[in-house]
Image (cartoon, rainbow, N blue to C red):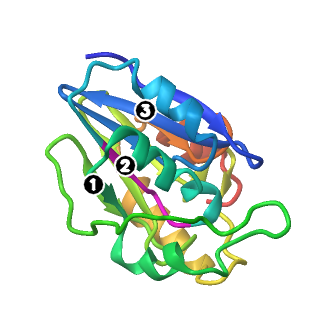
């Protein structure tokens, strides 16, 4: 099994992850710079490619349309509670990040034996984490960061719900489990338990 790779993309330096598992390449949060993501994706000899979205904020979905078309991707997973945000013209950060365009219809029912979807609402109503046990690694989107947590001051955010998601769903996972966030550096569950001031 090849290692996954990280590409920082866009104005807000979103971590886009390309995660190979056998014949499938998972592209997590292609937020911008579609040409870079497409080029890196083609380096993997995987027959199938799937996009996974940790949540629907514009900085995490900006390149979904272009990447989907360039790589002929059939499946874009997004939790159903973030679908309205995904398509909303207000999901933008003007004048820097316009709303994403030409977005394919997401599939909220997609499941795979390659990973577990852990629902962690709070940053957005449909925020999720992806637990790839064979690596093992947890991709946490903007739910949890090294030394911090996701913002909850944007529409749909809920601070108490986010804290409950992290404490109830993530902190019980193995201390040695590496976590990879939507922005910034990686950490471990155990380190965040003892060092994260928000927890």
Q: Is residue 54 magenta?
A: yes
Instruction: Determine crowd level at label 1: few under 14, some 14-19, many 20+ residues with C-alpha closer than 10 A.
Output: some
Of the numbered discs 3 and 1, the one sitting upstream in the chain is 3
Instruction: Determine crowd level at label 2: few under 14, some 14-19, many 20+ residues with C-alpha closer than 10 A.
Output: many
Q: Is residue 72 magenta?
A: no
Q: Is residue 18 left or right of residue 197?
A: left
Question: SS of the residue at dot 1?
Answer: strand
Instruction: Determine crowd level at label 3: few under 14, some 14-19, many 20+ residues with C-alpha closer than 10 A.
Output: many
Residue where numbered disc 3 is placed? 18
The answer to whether the residue labelled 3 contacts the one labelled 2, judged by CB atoms less than 8 Å apart, is no
Please provide the residue range marked out in magenta: 50-56
Q: Is residue 85 left or right of residue 114?
A: right
Residue 179 at what x, y percent from top left? 49, 39
Give the CA separation, mark 3 to mark 1: 15 Å
Of the numbered discs 1 and 2, the one sitting upstream in the chain is 2
Q: Residue furthest left?
A: 113
**Residue at the location (48% across, 53% down)?**
64
Q: Quadrant of residue 45?
A: top left
**Residue at the location (58% across, 48% down)?**
182
Residue where numbered disc 2 is placed? 51
In front here: 10 or 98? 98
Residue where numbered disc 1 is placed? 75
- Would you place residue 25 above or below residue 152 in this image? above
The answer to whether the residue labelled 1 contacts the one labelled 2, judged by CB atoms less than 8 Å apart, is yes
Give the CA separation, mark 3 to mark 2: 9 Å
**Residue at the location (48% across, 24% down)?**
40
Quadrant assignment for the C terminus: bottom right
Give the CA separation, mark 1 to mark 2: 6 Å
Q: Nearer the viewer, mark 3 or mark 1?
A: 1
Residue 5 at what x, y percent from top left? 48, 25
């Amino acid at each position: 099994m090849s290692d996954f790779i990280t590409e920082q993309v866009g104005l807000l330096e979103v971590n886009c992850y390309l995660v190979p598992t056998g014949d499938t390449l998972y592209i997590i949060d292609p937020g911008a710079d579609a040409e870079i993501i497409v080029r890196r994706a083609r380096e993997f000899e995987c027959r199938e490619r799937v996009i996974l979205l940790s949540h629907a904020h514009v900085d995490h979905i900006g390149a979904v349309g272009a990447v989907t078309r360039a790589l002929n991707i059939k499946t874009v997973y997004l939790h159903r509670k973030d679908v309205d945000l995904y398509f909303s013209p207000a999901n933008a950060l003007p004048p820097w990040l316009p709303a994403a365009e030409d977005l394919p219809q997401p599939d909220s029912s997609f499941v795979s034996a390659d990973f577990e979807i852990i629902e962690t609402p709070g940053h957005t109503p449909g925020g999720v984490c992806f637990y790839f046990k064979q690596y093992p690694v947890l991709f946490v989107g903007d739910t949890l960061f090294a030394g911090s947590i996701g913002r909850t001051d944007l529409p749909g955010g809920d601070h108490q719900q986010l804290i409950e998601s992290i404490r109830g769903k993530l902190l019980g996972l193995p201390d040695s489990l590496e976590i990879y966030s939507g922005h910034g550096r990686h950490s471990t569950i155990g380190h965040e338990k003892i060092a994260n001031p928000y927890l």
